[in-house]
Image (tube, rainbow, N blue to C red):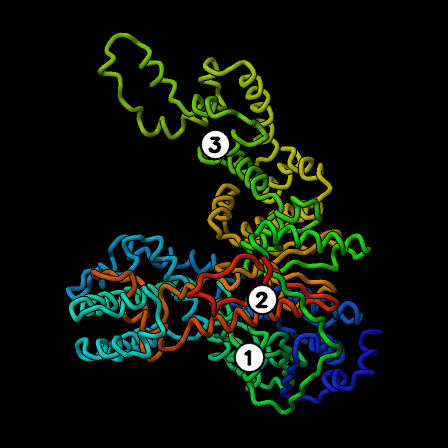
Amino acid sequence: MRAESSLAVVPTLERVASAPAGVTVVTGPPGSGKTSALAARAARLARQAPVHVICSHASGVRVFERHVRQLGAEQGIRVATGPQHCVHWLRTHYALAGVHPDIAAGGEAAARVVVRQAAQGLLDMTWPEVDGADLDLDVPFLSWVDKFLEEAAVLIRQLRGARISPEEFERGCALGITAFYGDEVEAALVKSADPQIVARVGRRGREALRAGAGVLQQQKRAERSCAVLLARLYREYLRCARTARSLSDEDLLDECIRWLSADRASARAIAASCSAVLVDDAEDANAALSELLTILHNAGLQTITLAGWPDAAIDGLEGRRSALSALAPDLRIELPLLSALPTPQLRRYADEGEESGALAGVLRDLLQQGVPPDSMAVLTRSDDAAIIYSQRLRDAGLPVDPPLGGFEEPAQLLDWLALAAVVDDPADQVHWLRVLASPLLGLADASIYALCEDPEAVTQLALDVGVGDERTRPRGERQRTALSLNLLEGRVDDRLPDAVRDVLGRFRLRFEKWRREYAGLPPAGVLARLARSGGFVSRWQENPLGRARRLDDMVRVIEAFAGAHARGIASLNAIVHAFEEGDIVVRDAMRSADAIACDSIASAKGERWPHVLVAGVAYERFPRVYVPRAMAFSRTYGLIVRENVAPGAAQTAKFAWYYARFDAKGLYLAQERRALAYGLSRGSRSAYASGFGSPPRWAKDYDLLPREERRS
């Protein structure tokens, strides 16, 4: 209990840990000890009854669990994100909740899967709305069905997070059309000509606002039709979600709230099952968490503690909302900084290469001073940027881990999964192509092309008689199976070089052995065995740099496949396809003790290191390019759709007006500035921010680095 006893020398932290029952709100800037105090409070309350701790991000869960372990108080404290807690409650009471007993958190991918199921009636044109005389199918995105469904999934997640029902959505869309356009389009013409609005928009926005009455009428008609289709899709989505085994975070919270709102006895049972609920990083909570806390409080849960700092809210674009004001507090505690944060060093370089070289130099100097690799972190604004910098620093010879949500060797991992797919289903031609080109076989393009040819067709074309009659494409079923038959049965071996025939001969023996020995094993078992027998594990162990991460990647993929099989995806081949489509959720990797962390700022929420370098502060990278949602919903103005199907500008006038009216870009840039400050606050001894290049003149206000810190 050393960590808890140390609170006695910090009166404000001790005040949090020993606060009486009730609703307590704890605020304080990064570095004020909120998580430490909350962990000590959880340890004390857990002596009476279990405690539920809700963290905003998976990284926060890792940090809080580490604090709890230091206190020696793991027993009775459940630390998870809000959706993970909801999964636990829904599974435990699935009969009362009316959900599938094996329900799981599936993230964004789960919403896309459910949307595709829900849209079946639209795709086969059996919805009665499609035959309506007043419905125009020339609606935004519908000409690209996949894009329409992708954007619809994002919108439905937004609606679920805001707890907006299909009926509220439909009603809001109808009222919103009148609110913006007026009886005809007279109100839209007035709004579009507002000088204050015109001054706020860019070139594309001005083009959109110049739409005439005829174009606005077309936009109005398309918006109405789009709203009809989306309302029906939303209803079908909810129907499919009832039996889905994997749901998005927003779905899980909504389902849990729906159930507990209707079943007061279950709400009282969950409230009575714990002594307290503690929420860390409450400024970036899931959108519906406030409502869930209110339900539990009204059901008898007396002790709820909310900890956070408004200026640390950095994930609003992902639908996060502050829960700090969810309940009226009985006690409010503001924590001061425990110690001053380091003064950040800010530098700008000519280009990305120069910046990466400077970052490598700073990290190398720290390593030479004896600083352990896991005491340093390079943080970026996005996962994509983190991948870029981790590779550049790797190339400079530094031990750097890629983002925890990605993979160390994605190409080799996909080779492994392709092999698993064809072992399960030898007729999978697409995955055979990857296996043939992988290091497992390493065939050249010419050999792969020969293996793809239909042997009967080639033989016929070699004849001198009846050439004109025989130059026809082989039957479809022959062409679809030509590659696997040629490969496994050797039908075109005589057209291959001797070395290739030898490679294929040895491979066929191994393949037949795999098929025979792994028959009947569960998908995760086959995958694990192929990792070794296919030589992947030995290759992953060859290079000591990143070895631990590669092996962890293997384990977490196998775990994900085991979970997918338990949720009802029967075959290994089907799970591989679902994984490649992004429909399988894989847990984050573990941080390596022998590597420098490189991740996005949001993915490091709650974590701290002695030395932090925030990289990539540059135009279009940090701040990122602001791209508003393609489809959004306002309770006042209804459906807001970006794409214009009428003549003229690419954007609709309503979209341009709405985002200018509420200064969405300004709110976004304020969040980007908060993200930079938060990233720098992750360093307890030193903090360093670097960028490169200069923004164009018209975007100079987006620059996050002070001008006096620039250097060429």
Q: Element at badge 2?
A: helix
- The residue shown at (61%, 54%) is 355
Q: Residues within 10 Å of mark 1 (few under 14, many from 20)?
A: many
- Tag 3 residue: 433
Q: Residues within 10 Å of mark 3 (few under 14, many from 20)?
A: some
Left-right relation of 79 to 452: right
- The residue shown at (51%, 44%) is 576
Q: Residues within 10 Å of mark 2 (few under 14, many from 20)?
A: some
Mark 1 or 2: in front is 1
- Tag 1 residue: 323
Q: CA distance from mark 3 to mark 2?
A: 38 Å
Left-right relation of 701 to 183: right
Left-right relation of 67 to 99: right
Q: Is residue 175 visible?
A: no
Question: Is residue 49 placed above or below 425 in the rendered structure?
Answer: below
- Tag 2 residue: 84
> As drawn, which residue projects farthest toward the bottom?
330
- The residue shown at (60%, 35%) is 518
Residue 256 location (% of width, % of height): 51, 72
User: Which three-letter amino acid code belongs to the residue tagged 3?
Assistant: Leu
Q: Element at badge 3?
A: helix
- Nearest to the observer: residue 17 or residue 615: 615
- Marks 3 and 2, the one that precedes in the sequence: 2
Residue 40 location (% of width, % of height): 75, 77
